[in-house]
Each structure stands twice: as structure tokens, then as C-alpha cells.
Amino acid sequence: MADLEEFRASVRSWLEANAPKSLRGKMRDPAAAFWGGKKTPLPYPDSRPWLDMMAERGWTIPFWPKEYGGGGLDKEETKILNEELARLELPPPLTGFGITMIGPTILQYGTEEQKKLYIPQIIKGEIRWCQGYSEPNAGSDLANVQLKAVVDGDDYILNGQKTWTSFGDLSDWMFLLVRSNPDVKKQAGITFLLTDLDLPGVEIRPIKLISGASPFCEVFFEDVRVPRHQILNRVDGGWEVARALLGHERTMIANTFGGRQSAAESPENPMEAAAKKYIGLKDGKLVDDAVRQRMAQNQIDEQSFLLTVQRNGDNVKAGHRPGPETSIFKVYGTELNQRRQELMLSIVGPESLGWEGDGFEKSELDLTRVWLRSRGNTLEGGSSEIQLNIIAKQVLGLPD
Amino acid sequence: MELVLNEEQTMLAQTVKEFIKDNSPVTRMRKLRDDRDMLGYSKDVWKQMADLGWTAILFSEEDGGLGLGMAETVLVTEAMGRNLAPEPFISCIMLAGQAIAQGGSKELREEWLTPIIAGDKVLAVGYQEKGKRYDIRNIGTSAVKGADGYVLNGEKTQVVDGYGADAVIVSARTSGKDGDADGITLFLIPKDAAGMTVTRQWRLDSKNVAQVQLKDVKVPAANVVGEVDKGGALLAKVIDLATVALCGEMLGGMSSAFDRMLAYMKERVQFNVVIGSFQALKHRAAKMYMEVELSRSVVMAAARAVDENHKDKDIFISTAKARCSDAYIAITNEAVQIFGGNGMTDEEEIGFYMKRARAAEMTFGDATFHKDRFAALKGY
């Protein structure tokens, strides 16, 4: 214990001496998260030195092994570091798929050479990764990927297309599923590959969404040569890797939700504020009784959901394995968010129809886009229908 | 709050579950119904539960209890709810017992709490009146102060476990008018009081409920539970506690109904396959599973909020009652649909759960009532 207190003291004094003052208080600022890589703009001028000084100590991912550049901290030390970062309200120096998805997967499946090559780059935030899973004919039926990989000497030659690639245009590398064997059962002919997106033959086009934003891209591959040693796991062993990565992704989603406060404790609620502004109270009650009941239902649903996330977290903290309740997070959380945005439109009324320009407040224009964007929540990352299939099969044990 | 069971709670949950499994299959409740048993529960089973200490959980050590909390209490009611055990836990322990423990004079506590905790005497609380729906401030029963105490007139309906009760605590208006929070007083009336008639009523869930008619019933001032004119607040507080216990029961009931539905989906064959292989049914099952999980979280949270005297405990309580009401009904409705024609027969037990879901929903305020209360507490 004395060692831990010493560790805490040294972390504290180092952070107080070195952490950029301009970033303090920005812990919950979503814009302060830096995704790393060569193409992503820096959120704040001090984001770069902050990343560099933390990466040097391996503290961008403090619990990864020291031999690959991680911090090598144990559970207790990691907790202390996080507490000290929170004490100064500092944002995480680095975020992204390197940390949450491909990094853990490389540590699990990579060769020694691959770990030595990629993990330090991930820790330093030198590469921003994107996920190349979905294709025009491989959405919910992900195992149907068709992007062709043909062996030619020491290389694979890739031909085909990925789509719905989040921030493909801002990423440096992609981890992707390719069709390496078309003559076996779908799942048995897929290989998991890592590739540089700056190679000749790669073309990236943003997709414009109904909300007007373009967070996703199509990525085309035409005779792109990728060295064969950049596969993870064995040839045709990609499906297993994809499933393992999905597990890492779920943990990430649970952590994201778990970080939030329970509904009853959050200080101000944008929906209540909007209802008071656009609908109004009479004798302390919203004038529109139907909206009032929907709001109560929505907040009860939100509280129930957050409490379930908390219950899962408390279970894990108490040393139990995560329960089957984690399987409901994706489908319930996303559908809840859609109901919330739908209700916000009902509350704001005709002012929620604005697209741009004069006569609408910024919050009204934002709402329109947020609502449209939320419709994708139940599609990306495994549609609600696929999630329900997973619950039915893996949790409830219902047969195919 | 921590939404996880500690070691003692895990053991308690296990013990109650096993006791109920061994001593209270749903067939027992069916037999009580078929026999038109006037009591509707078993005094022997109730005494055994008391001997195991479960009736003592919530009472202070000073009153002869264990001094534990709602987090433990809901484990008992959940296990009872799983098999629809009809014993008078919520009526006698949560309502009457807590009213006396929290508001009763020293004399009342000494006289009644020991036999209540021992399972020797059963008390009920009459607060509901015909046509008054869920607002406990709407009271037609009157209590007029006379030379030696009060004279009560009025009628209570669906008094749970009122038939055969050793005493009934009733709410009556001592001042003010219908709807006022003040001016309500609680009176404890022993079963042999002149002018009180207790008539068994028969309800769809086969619970013991009774009509309590009061005609010039004389009640000494010593039998006032809590303060004169301030009984409304005491009643509301006790009903809040009982609501959390009832949510525990509802969680147990919906879990059992869900498990039964799932088991049936895995055994019932149509078109040469088990019906659980159909995606239309799988998705419905997955959605009901989510409702069970969400309900478990809100029940655990409401119990802990009460135990911690959380500033938002009323919000947690209404969240739990609204969610459990909707979920219990949705799950039992779905279960009967998936059981098909079998679900419509009296022989199949799933119907008992659907009936109990309705009765539980309409006890202590339905989902709409609690959403309204939630909104009011949130300031809209």
C-alpha cells in the first residue's frame, strides 16, 4: 500500500508540473479527444505535447506491456493514474480504434514482430486506424465479404470495395476482412489484413448522409499490393479474429455508457429545458399532457438503462464476470436514443424542421441533424435485428 | 449505491428461493383457489417464514427485528413472486407492520409488533375505497371525535388479507375535505370491534381481499396510529416502502413467466421444428428478456435508494413501479400468446401470472399514475 501511495504522489507531482494548463477542465469536452494519426486535425494546440509526454511514459494505454511501449501498470496503478487525471480534469491524451479495437486484437493474435512494429505506433498515436468490415453486400450478413485477395509472390493483390468506413478519410491504416478463399463455407475463407491506405490503387470517397454530415466513407481497392506478412492470425482465419475484436468493441461500448451518471443525478436535462421553453408549464405541469407522459416514459427508460449499465459495472468491480445483461446495451441504448431524439422533435415542434440559415436557432438546427443521425444508431455496429438474434441465440439459447 | 448483492444477500436470496421452491409450488396457490379457501394463504407456511426470520428483516432491533433494509426485503418478495406465494408479507409486514413501527405509540408497538414478527397475528391496512382510484387522499370514510375516542363510518374495498385479520388499520378523514393531504388519520381496529363487518371479496388473482364496512365503530384515541390529521403522510411513506416490496414480487413473477415462456419455445414443435427457432418469436423473446433485466436494475436501485434515504428516492420508487407494471403485463401477455391455446386454459399455470400482473399493476398506483408522479417530482 505504501508503494501505491508513493506512486500516487509521483503521478500527482508530475502531472501538476507537466500537464498543459490549457487542457485542464476539459475532461468531459468531447472535442478534446484526439484520434491521432497524420490526417486528423489537432483539437487544441496543446493536444500534441500532451500526447507526446504521456506516450513517452506509455501512459496513453497505461496497462499495456512495457516491452511494446505501454505503461506496464497494474490494475491498482492504472486506477490511481485515472483518478489523478480526473483530479485535474484532464482529457485522455489519445483515443481511437487503435486503443479500443485493433491494439488489443494485435496483442492477442499478432506475431512477435507485428507486436513490436504496430503496438508502439498505436501507443504514440502515430497511426489512426479505421475498420474495413462492411461492403455493399456484406452488412448484417458480414461473413459475405467479397473484397478479393489474391496471392502474388510476397503480396496480396486486393480488388473490391469497403463501405460505411467511419472516418476513412481521416485514417492512415485500415484493418479489414478480405475474401481469401471463395471455395469454402463463407466464414472459413476470410482473412484479417492490415493495410496502409496511402498505397497506390486506394480511393476514399466520403458518403453524404441524410443529416448532411459525412462521417463515413466508401473505400475502393484496385490492384492494391499489400505484403502478405500483414495478415493477423493464419490465412483464412480472419473470422475468428473479427469475433474477438467484436468482444473488445463491446467492452468499449459498455465503458462509454458506464462513464455516464445515472439519470437521477445529472444536474440539468436538455429535454426538460426544451419542454419548458417550447411547450410551457401551467401550474407546474407541462401544458401538453401527452408529451408529458412520453417524457416521463423516456426518462424512466433512460434511468432503467443507465442503472443496468451501472449494475453490470458494479458486478465486474465486485469480481464477478460480466453478466448476460451486457448483450442488451447496444440494442436498447441505440433505440432509446432514437426515441429521445424523436421526442425532442415533438417537443420543439415546427422549429425543428430547419435545415440552415436564418429564422432558426443554432440549437434547433443542431437538433434536426442529431435526430437524422440517430436513425443510423440501430444500423451501424450490428443492426438491432442482428443484436436481437445474438441475444436469442447466445443468451437465451434459442436454436437456429 | 452499489447494484450488486453482497455475500449475506446472496445467501438470503438462495435460501428464500429454495424454501419457496420446496414449500410453495404454484399448485399450492391453485388448490387454495379451487378450495375457495377463505384465508387464501397458509398460516403454517407463514409461520415457517416467520421462524426463518424473514418477517423480521425490516424492523429495528429495538422492535424485535433484524434491522436490515429494503435491499434484503425485495429478495424475499422476489422469491415469493416467482411462485405466486400468497402469504401476507406486503399487507401485514410492509403496510400494517411498518405503519405501527414508524408511527405507532410505544403501547401499540409492544402489543402488535411482537406477534406480527412472530407470524402469530396478521394485520391489514384498509386505504382503498370504491371509485377513488389511486389517490390515497380521496377518502369518504369519516372519523368524528367524541367523548371517549372516535366514531368511524365508511367502507374500504379490496383490503388485502383483510379477511381473517386480527386487526385492520384504516384511513379516515378527521378534518378537511376529499383530496386534502392533511386531515387524514390512521386507526387500528381489532377484528371484534362492534360495527365492523369484514366480507371476503373474490378477485381474479385469488388473493385474500375484503370489503370492510364501518358503521358507528368506536375506536379509542389510543388506537390512533401516528398523529391525528397527519396520517396521510405516514400512509404515503408506508405505501412507498410497500411499493418497492411489491416491485420485488413483480420482478419475481415476470422472471418466472419469462422462463416458462422460454422453456415452452424450446419444446413446442410446429412445422417439424421447435417454435423457438422462428425469428419472429426470437425477437419478441429477446425484447422481453431486456424488460426483465431493466426491471431487475430498477428494483435493486429503488430498494437501495430507500435504504440510503437518497434525495431522489421517490423518483427511484416511481421508476420501479412504472417499469415493473408495464413489464409484468407485457411479458405475461406475450407469454400467453406464445403458449397459444394452451395459455388460454386454466390448466396451464401461465394464466395465473397474467392475472396477478394486472392486480399488482393496479396496487399502489398503476404505470400511468407513477409516470405522472415521476413528471411532477421532476418539476414538469
Image (spheres, coloured by chain):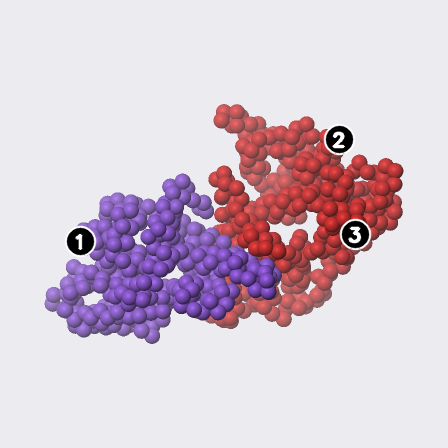
Chain colours: A red, B purple
Q: Answer few, some or many: residues within 10 Å of disc 3's Cα (few below 14, many 20 plus, some between 14 and 19).
A: many
Q: Secondary structure at mark 2?
A: helix
Q: Position of residue B151 (x, y in %)?
A: 17, 69
Q: Is residue A280 left or right of residue A122?
A: left
Q: Mark 2 = which residue?
A: A113
Label 2 and label 1: CA atoms lie apart by: 80 Å
Q: Amino acid at mark 3?
A: Gln
* Circle number at residue B111: 1
Q: Same chain for labels 2 and 1? Say yes or no.
A: no
Label 3 and label 1: CA atoms lie apart by: 80 Å
Q: Residue at 25% of width from left, 72% of height from top?
A: B155
Q: Is residue B56 above or below residue A73?
A: below
Q: Position of residue B321 (x, y in %)?
A: 42, 60
Q: Residue at 43% of width from left, 54% of height from top?
A: B299
Q: Amino acid at mark 1?
A: Glu
Q: Residue at 71% of width from left, 64% of height from top?
A: A356
Q: Mark 3 = which residue?
A: A146
Q: Same chain for labels 3 and 1? Say yes or no.
A: no
